[in-house]
Image: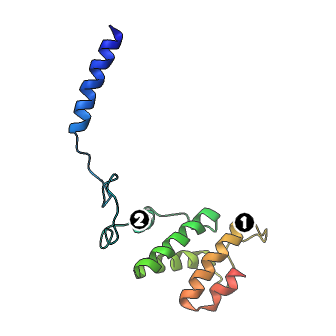
Amino acid sequence: MKSTFVAAATAVFAGLASAVDLPTGWFSIAPDDEIQPGDLKGKPRYLTWMADSQIKHGVEPTHAYTISSFYSGVMLAYERTGDQKYLDYVKHATDIILYPEWDGTILLYNNSNSIDDIRFGHTFLDIYNKTGNEIYKTAAS
Protein backbone atom coordinates (compact mmCIF):
# COMPACT_ATOMS: atom_id res chain seq x y z
CA MET A 1 0.00 0.00 0.00
CA LYS A 2 2.75 2.42 0.99
CA SER A 3 4.81 1.70 -2.13
CA THR A 4 1.73 2.18 -4.34
CA PHE A 5 1.07 5.56 -2.74
CA VAL A 6 4.72 6.62 -3.17
CA ALA A 7 4.70 5.52 -6.82
CA ALA A 8 1.46 7.40 -7.51
CA ALA A 9 2.69 10.55 -5.75
CA THR A 10 5.98 10.39 -7.65
CA ALA A 11 4.14 10.11 -10.97
CA VAL A 12 1.89 13.06 -10.13
CA PHE A 13 4.76 15.27 -8.97
CA ALA A 14 6.89 14.31 -11.98
CA GLY A 15 4.06 15.33 -14.28
CA LEU A 16 3.59 18.63 -12.48
CA ALA A 17 7.32 19.36 -12.40
CA SER A 18 7.72 18.77 -16.13
CA ALA A 19 4.91 21.24 -16.84
CA VAL A 20 6.61 24.03 -14.88
CA ASP A 21 8.77 26.39 -16.91
CA LEU A 22 11.16 27.95 -14.41
CA PRO A 23 12.40 31.46 -15.09
CA THR A 24 16.10 31.79 -15.71
CA GLY A 25 16.37 34.70 -13.25
CA TRP A 26 19.49 36.69 -13.95
CA PHE A 27 20.81 33.96 -16.24
CA SER A 28 20.91 35.13 -19.83
CA ILE A 29 21.28 31.53 -21.01
CA ALA A 30 19.25 28.67 -19.59
CA PRO A 31 21.27 26.30 -17.37
CA ASP A 32 20.99 23.33 -19.79
CA ASP A 33 21.72 25.31 -22.97
CA GLU A 34 25.12 24.93 -24.56
CA ILE A 35 27.00 28.22 -24.72
CA GLN A 36 28.23 29.09 -28.18
CA PRO A 37 30.89 31.70 -29.03
CA GLY A 38 29.23 35.12 -29.12
CA ASP A 39 26.23 34.04 -27.00
CA LEU A 40 27.17 36.38 -24.15
CA LYS A 41 27.68 39.45 -26.30
CA GLY A 42 25.55 42.23 -24.84
CA LYS A 43 24.00 40.04 -22.13
CA PRO A 44 24.43 40.33 -18.35
CA ARG A 45 27.47 38.68 -16.86
CA TYR A 46 28.02 37.29 -13.39
CA LEU A 47 31.07 39.48 -12.81
CA THR A 48 29.23 42.78 -13.22
CA TRP A 49 26.12 41.43 -11.48
CA MET A 50 28.22 40.52 -8.44
CA ALA A 51 30.11 43.81 -8.43
CA ASP A 52 26.94 45.90 -8.80
CA SER A 53 25.15 43.92 -6.10
CA GLN A 54 27.94 44.31 -3.55
CA ILE A 55 28.42 47.98 -4.39
CA LYS A 56 24.70 48.55 -3.85
CA HIS A 57 24.71 46.77 -0.48
CA GLY A 58 28.09 48.16 0.59
CA VAL A 59 31.10 46.62 2.28
CA GLU A 60 32.87 47.65 5.45
CA PRO A 61 35.76 50.01 4.67
CA THR A 62 38.55 47.98 6.26
CA HIS A 63 41.83 46.56 5.02
CA ALA A 64 40.65 42.96 5.54
CA TYR A 65 41.74 40.21 3.14
CA THR A 66 38.19 39.46 2.00
CA ILE A 67 37.44 43.10 1.27
CA SER A 68 40.63 43.44 -0.76
CA SER A 69 39.72 40.30 -2.71
CA PHE A 70 36.34 41.83 -3.47
CA TYR A 71 38.04 45.02 -4.69
CA SER A 72 40.17 42.90 -7.04
CA GLY A 73 36.94 41.53 -8.52
CA VAL A 74 35.56 45.03 -8.96
CA MET A 75 38.81 46.08 -10.65
CA LEU A 76 38.44 43.09 -12.97
CA ALA A 77 34.93 44.32 -13.81
CA TYR A 78 36.45 47.71 -14.64
CA GLU A 79 39.11 46.15 -16.86
CA ARG A 80 36.59 43.97 -18.70
CA THR A 81 33.88 46.60 -19.18
CA GLY A 82 35.74 49.90 -19.09
CA ASP A 83 32.95 51.26 -16.87
CA GLN A 84 34.48 54.06 -14.80
CA LYS A 85 32.11 53.48 -11.86
CA TYR A 86 34.06 50.37 -10.84
CA LEU A 87 37.41 52.17 -10.71
CA ASP A 88 35.82 55.12 -8.90
CA TYR A 89 34.31 52.80 -6.29
CA VAL A 90 37.60 51.06 -5.46
CA LYS A 91 39.52 54.35 -5.49
CA HIS A 92 37.02 55.90 -3.08
CA ALA A 93 37.26 52.87 -0.79
CA THR A 94 41.06 53.02 -0.70
CA ASP A 95 40.91 56.76 -0.07
CA ILE A 96 38.81 56.07 3.04
CA ILE A 97 41.55 53.76 4.34
CA LEU A 98 44.15 56.51 3.77
CA TYR A 99 42.07 59.27 5.38
CA PRO A 100 42.82 61.52 7.36
CA GLU A 101 46.61 61.57 6.89
CA TRP A 102 46.60 61.31 3.09
CA ASP A 103 50.34 60.69 3.01
CA GLY A 104 50.30 56.94 2.39
CA THR A 105 49.72 56.10 6.05
CA ILE A 106 47.01 53.48 6.48
CA LEU A 107 44.36 54.20 9.09
CA LEU A 108 44.43 51.65 11.95
CA TYR A 109 47.49 49.83 10.56
CA ASN A 110 49.31 47.99 13.35
CA ASN A 111 52.53 46.93 11.57
CA SER A 112 51.75 43.25 12.06
CA ASN A 113 52.41 42.32 8.40
CA SER A 114 49.46 39.95 8.48
CA ILE A 115 48.02 38.40 5.33
CA ASP A 116 45.27 41.06 5.46
CA ASP A 117 47.82 43.84 5.19
CA ILE A 118 49.76 42.12 2.44
CA ARG A 119 46.62 41.44 0.38
CA PHE A 120 45.41 45.02 0.64
CA GLY A 121 48.74 46.14 -0.81
CA HIS A 122 47.55 44.62 -4.08
CA THR A 123 44.53 46.91 -4.02
CA PHE A 124 46.72 49.96 -3.50
CA LEU A 125 48.95 48.85 -6.38
CA ASP A 126 45.91 48.31 -8.63
CA ILE A 127 44.82 51.90 -7.98
CA TYR A 128 48.38 53.18 -8.39
CA ASN A 129 48.64 51.44 -11.79
CA LYS A 130 45.42 53.10 -12.96
CA THR A 131 46.00 56.60 -11.54
CA GLY A 132 49.77 56.96 -11.29
CA ASN A 133 49.32 58.69 -7.91
CA GLU A 134 52.40 57.93 -5.79
CA ILE A 135 50.40 57.95 -2.56
CA TYR A 136 48.95 54.52 -3.41
CA LYS A 137 52.42 53.13 -4.14
CA THR A 138 53.61 54.48 -0.77
CA ALA A 139 50.62 52.89 0.97
CA ALA A 140 51.37 49.54 -0.67
CA SER A 141 54.87 49.55 0.75
Q: Position of residue 28 (x, y in %)?
A: 30, 61
Q: Which residue shows up at 31% across the image and 59% down it?
A: 29
Identify the mark nearer the N-term, 2 or 1: 2
In screen coordinates, is 96 left or right of 121?
A: left
Residue 40: where, in percent of width, then height?
33, 69
Callout 2: SS? helix
Residue depicted at x 22% and y 40%: 20
Q: CA distance from mark 2 to mark 1?
A: 27 Å
Determine the residue positioned at 63% across, 85% down: 136
Q: Among all residues in the image, which is located at the extreme left?
A: 19
Q: Secondary structure at mark 1?
A: helix
Name the foreground residue: 43 vs 87. Answer: 43
Quarter of the figure with the C terminus: bottom right
Disc 2 residue type (three-letter):
Lys
Tag 2 residue: 56
Can residue 38 be seen?
A: yes
Quadrant of the image for the N terminus? top left
Other residues around mark 1 within 10 Å, as few (<14) / some (14–19) / many (≥20): few
Which residue appears at 60% of the width and 62% of the height?
66
**With 78 as the anchor, is 30 left or right in this view?**
left
Image location (x, y in percent) of residue 6: 33, 17
Check disc 2: other Cα within 10 Å, few if <14, some if 14-19, many if 20+. few
Which amino acid, by three-letter code, is at mark 1? Answer: Ile
Residue bearing the label numbered 1: 115
Horizontal and vertical percent position of residue 11: 26, 25
Q: Quadrant of residue 63?
A: bottom right
Q: Answer left or right for 84 relative to 123.
A: left
Task: Tell which of 59 and 127 is nearer to you.
Answer: 127
> In the rendered view, would you say 17 is above or below 61?
above
Examine the rendering and report whether any part of residue 103 can be seen: no
